[in-house]
Amino acid sequence: MSKKNRTKFSIIRAAAAMGIALLVAFLLILLSADGANFSEKIAASGKALREMLVSPLFKKNGNFSMKNFSDVLAGMIPIMFTGLATCIMFSANQFNLGAEGGIMLGAFVTALVAIYAPIPGPLLMVVAVLAGGVAVGIVMLIPAVLKAKLGVSEMVNSLMLNYVIMYFLNYLMNSFLADTSKGITQTYAFQDNALIPQMIDNGSRLSWGFVIGIIMVILCWFFMYRTRWGYGIRMTGINQPFVMYSGMNVPLIIIISQVIGGVLAGMGGGIEMLGRYNVYNWSALPGYGWTGITVAILAGNNPAYVPLAAFFMSYLTKGCTLMSTNANVPSQLIDIIQAVIFIFFAAQQFLAGYRQKLVVKSAQEELAAKAAAMKAERSEQ
Amino acid sequence: MSEELVIQMKGITKVYPNGTVANQDVNFDVRKGEIHALMGENGAGKSTLMKMLFGLEQPTSGEILVNGEVVNLSSPTVAISKGIGMVHQHFMLVPSLTVAENMALGMVPKKSGVLIDYKKAVEITEEYSKKFNLRVDANAKVMDIPVGMKQKVEILKALVRGAKILILDEPTAVLTTQETVELFTELKNLKKQGYTLIFISHKLNEIMEITDRMTILRGGRSMGIHETKDVTPEEISRLMVGRDVILKVDKDQAKPTDEVLKVRDLEYVNEWGKKMLDKVSLSVRKGEILGIAGVEGNGQKELVDMLFGFNTPNAGTIEVNGANIIGLGQRELRERHIALVPEDRMLYGIAGTASIEENVISDRCGEKRLNKGILFNMKAIHEESAKLVKDYTVLCKSAQQQVGSLSGGNIQKVVVAREFSNGPELIIADQPTRGIDVGATEFIRKKLVELSRSGIAVLLVSADLNEVMELSDSLIIMCGGKIAAYFEDTKELSDELMGKYMLGIEKQTPEEIRRVCHE
């Protein structure tokens, strides 16, 4: 199949999956909608759906809502990082699901540095975020090395690791680190010079971390498509025996891909922490890692599409929140939408018939072109 | 013996969707109660013919009669209902279940209609085991039992399902000598009880020992049905091994110089305890092509695995340019300028969904000339891939095209473009032209000759007789994990002579074979 047709198919497939997800969402809203009769229910569902799809951008009066829009952008920050992390790990065919625990650990380590490290000026910010990234990179060595050396499933290990991280951090918080003068479990406040400045001062917490995220997207793309290591990662994802036979170090690639994924997730946690909060108070997994998996799948593991996918997911999340506030529909609906998108993307055979048609069409075009070329050649002679 | 024909296949032709003609106008029949051998080289069409008899494939034309009645074998279920059973070469068993559970799969005895009656399954297994004198341990898990017993389970499975006619697909390929002897006793016993057996093999001594009649296939056509007692091994080998089309390759006399590859007394016993390589010694020198001929499964694959670091031998030495290479990884081997055209090109040769460009740089992506600091030098990479596509006449729109969308011949050209172009000193070409079109075949063969004449050592492993005889300067034949013969000059060779060595009818003396070491 030609590259053009492949891209066309990917886009149509993505649109179809999202469309079906929204349709399912609509049906669920309809089921739970208020109203005495069917037409009232339809009206209520329509209103709810409008809240979900339109209000992240527009106010009730139809004017553009800068506040809501910057909320959406701010919501992209952590899931761009987890999305990138997952892209790189999945590209090597490593189904590491540790971005979830990774972002929590990264946030925690960054918070500790931001509270306690005696570093002057904005340097503290940089060191804190990098410390978060490095810490998670090191922790990701556990599933990575176990996979590379012993063949243990990285999926199971990283999944369990998420909970190990969560409970371990909660233990540290409750036993040693909590500010006991406060009514809830939280750390002491970060030093002021650790906080990442806001881009817009409208309370939406859209920090300059967003720009760092975009920069990381570009760096990751270059890493994946313009360096030998990214090349090795992608080839390993396509055909591991081929990479071994070609003389590349497969175990090292397996480890590197997961460590880089860990670093990205950890940095994402740090940036989220310093851009949005001034104390660390997470006591449960934040969910950004799971959304990051959806982002990576939507982006087809290509870093270049991560911002788009992250925007879509952040937009829907914001929409669902607004819908629950204004239209009395539970915001957990976002999880169902995610799940449906997930299923259709993971389903190899989804739209396979359509793909087959494209392949056949492509092949026929090629044959026709070849025949024409031969004809031209003959007439020349 | 009765003359009643239980199976008749008349005028069978099979064309696969991709255009391969696997069988052409084949007539085949089997008498009740006989052991009938189906012989032929790899790719001769044995498996296809038997797949049609077992309902796995449908003939393009021709008819099949079972017990004199025309049948439409649309699936294995239909074949089984007609009393036909098949024992596959690769066992179709569930390793984590016990023998009895495997026996019961698909026909599970039930207690009061719901619960699985495991005891009954064991009883049935033991009853059949006793009846046919095929001893198996009903309660053992399949993964814990030896290969020979797994095969017995397969045979019993077919018998329990009511098979009167058993197709055995190369049953001895995986067995040790002892297990083979045992199997033959059991097969003779089955024959005595009135069962009909079709025995696929290319091992002559086995055929001579246990079969009554044989059908020989060559290039998809039948070379006739023969009574085993009326034919000599020589005749069989002449019928089986023969050349059809000959692609001539012009080449000058080789002028070999220094020894590049030196293999001495290589031994390897596989995980089932079967000796796959037995004291194999050979040398390949600069500027020559050494061919390895032989029926597949006689140690060639194991030898190549040893040479390219996929496996390690139990004993012996392998040296390239005087230095040991056993235990080295593929990167180190490539750094020593060893290149491999792998037998399985889809598994090792390419990354299917990546582009041609990404496929031709896989062995050199770390080299300085293709990198600028930490980034790839995309210009150099584009130039390199465009040059290779042009030099190796890969038919494609551009080097950015997905490699998996190319034809088999062009995929193989991509593989050889990479393997031949990075300054190799030793090229191991394992079945380099298998299953590809004539144009690509000719191109690759010419390229191999050209490279050898430029001073590269080439080791050519091929089951294609034309290929080894046309390309090789000198030739060895492998049989049963040993080198059966060495020919210094391939010109003096005839197909018949090669056939005899390939099938183990004749064997050279150790002194004659030792000449391949050039000591």
Image (spheres, coloured by chain):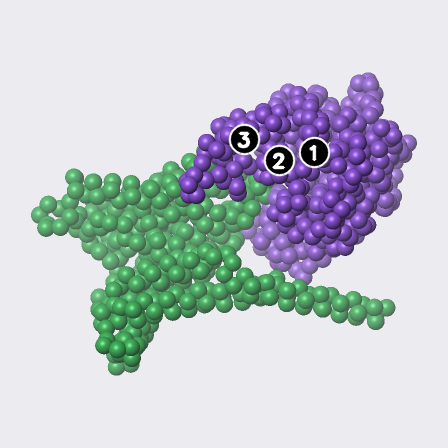
Q: Which residue is mark 2?
A: B159
Q: Which chain is purple?
A: B
Query: Dot 2 lies on which element?
Result: helix
Q: Which residue is mark 1?
A: B195
Residue type at numbered disc 3: Thr
Q: Residue at x 61, y 56 (%)?
A: B402
Q: Which residue is mark 3?
A: B125
Residue type at numbered disc 2: Leu
Q: Is residue A259 above or below residue B232?
A: below
Q: Residue at x 36, y 60 (%)?
A: A338
Q: Where on the picture, by quarter, is residue A368?
A: bottom right
Residue B325 is left or right of residue B486, and the answer is left
Query: Dot 1 lies on which element?
Result: loop
Q: Which chain is green?
A: A
Query: Dot 3 lies on which element?
Result: helix
Residue B245 in the image, given as x and y percentages of width and height: 85, 46
